[in-house]
Image: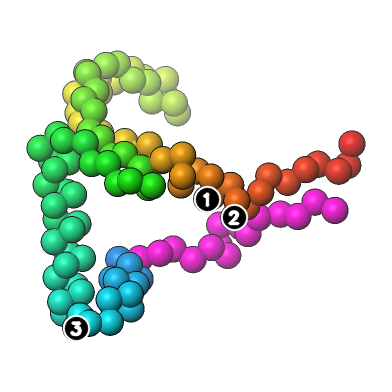
Amino acid sequence: MRQSLPNETDRKTTTRADLLNAVYESCKGLSRAQARDIFEMALEEISEALVRGEPVKLRSFGLFTVRSKRERIGRNPRTGIEVPIKPRRVLTFRPSPVLIASINAAHPPQRDLEA
């Protein structure tokens, strides 16, 4: 029997508040305000490094980088009209092998037994 993964509507989104609560719960010596300040400082430092164009590598999690995309011509898929796309910087994320392995261990690939 083939087991399915939960649909998009069944999944819970982890929010900023959830992450802050996890920091607070794991550091019993800190007040909620102190945990919030530490959490906000960490996010601020990550954001500022990315704005400066520096890569951010979080061991066992992944690598955030900013790359520049050149100007190019795009096409509106509905009308087919060509439009110029301005140059811009985009944020990319590359998960670490450790994170990928953790995700695959949590949801092992399903074998198709109907063959």
Q: Residue at x 19, y 28 (%)?
A: 88
Q: Nearer the viewer, residue 76 or 23?
A: 23
Place of residue 57 in the rendered image (x, y in percent of width and height, measured from the top left): 27, 41
Place of residue 28 in the rendered image (x, y in percent of width and height, measured from the top left): 28, 82
Q: Is residue 2 magenta?
A: yes
Q: Is residue 21 visible?
A: no
Q: CA distance from mark 1 to mark 3?
A: 31 Å
Q: CA distance from mark 2 to mark 1?
A: 6 Å
What residue sits right under mark 1 in the picture? 102
Q: Quadrant of residue 65?
A: top left
Q: Nearer the viewer, residue 114 or 19?
A: 19
What residue sits right under mark 3 in the picture? 31
Is residue 105 left or right of 115 when viewed as pictured?
A: left
Give the residues drawn in magenta, as a range.
1-15
- Classified by dominant secondary structure, the portion drawn in magenta counts as loop
Is residue 26 left or right of 53 when viewed as pictured?
A: right
Q: Is residue 38 visible?
A: yes
Q: Is residue 5 magenta?
A: yes
Check disc 3 and give the amino acid type: Ser
What residue sits right under mark 2 in the picture? 106
